[in-house]
Amino acid sequence: MGHSRDIPADLTRNQGLVLGALTGSGAPLSAYDILDQLRSEGLRAPLQIYRALDKLVERGLAHRLESLNAFVACTDAHCHRKGLIAFAICESCGKVDEFADTVIEERLAAWAGSTGFTVGRTTMEIRGRCAACLGA
Ligand SMILES: [Zn+2]
Ligand SMILES: [Zn+2]
């Protein structure tokens, strides 16, 4: 976690632009934020952004934060292999930290095993304040 990843060569131009916008942003972006940033690149329609985002999310290169209705670039090269992705969202500065936690994952697996529920994908969104904001 923590290090950013290279943009894969097989993305379409629009996917590359959208991923670049997300990677360059310090905070989650809505589809309309992304569209605003990419107007100068010739992107005009929200649908172009949504299509690119769908593919990026499908490939695990970006994630959708349901509670914010916004998107972030994946910062964990191996995250698509994991069953659980967690995000710590600072409500003060908007910073989002992606992490994975095996303890939570094991607890979830134990719960799923005991209830017979099959877990597909789990995304946790934890809201609070980051260390930098608490120190300020
Ligand atoms: Zn990720
Ligand atoms: Zn903060």
Image: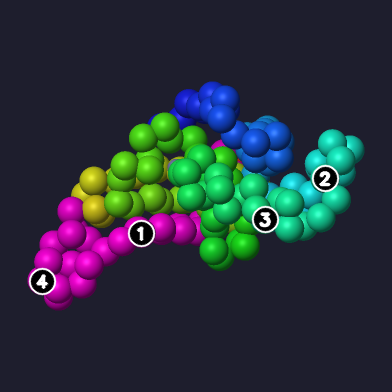
Whether residue 121 is in magenta: the answer is: yes
Mark 3 C-beta closer than 8 Å to ligand 1: no
User: Which residue is rendered at x = 86% and y = 40% of the image?
Assistant: 42
Element type at mark 3 = helix
Work out whether 20 lies above or below 60: above
Residue under label 1: 122
Mark 1 C-beta closer than 8 Å to ligand 1: no
The dot on residue 50 is 3
Q: Position of residue 83 (x, y in %)?
A: 30, 51
Determine if residue 92 is in view. Answer: no
Q: Earlier in the sequence, mark 2 or mark 4?
A: 2
Query: What's the residue type where badge 1 is placed?
Result: Thr
Q: Earlier in the sequence, mark 3 or mark 1?
A: 3
Q: Position of residue 111 (x, y in %)?
A: 17, 67
Where residue 116 sits, quadrant-wise, is: bottom left
Q: Earlier in the sequence, mark 1 or mark 2?
A: 2
Element type at mark 1 = strand
Q: Position of residue 126 (x, y in %)?
A: 45, 57
Which callout, 1 or 2, points to the residue nearer the camera? 2
Query: What's the residue type where badge 3 is placed?
Result: Tyr
Q: Earlier in the sequence, mark 3 or mark 4?
A: 3
Tell me the distance, in whole angstroms, between the alpha carbons under discs 3 and 1: 22 Å
Residue under label 2: 43
Element type at mark 2 = loop
Tell me the distance, in whole angstroms, between the alpha carbons under discs 3 and 4: 38 Å
Q: Position of residue 94 (x, y in %)?
A: 63, 49
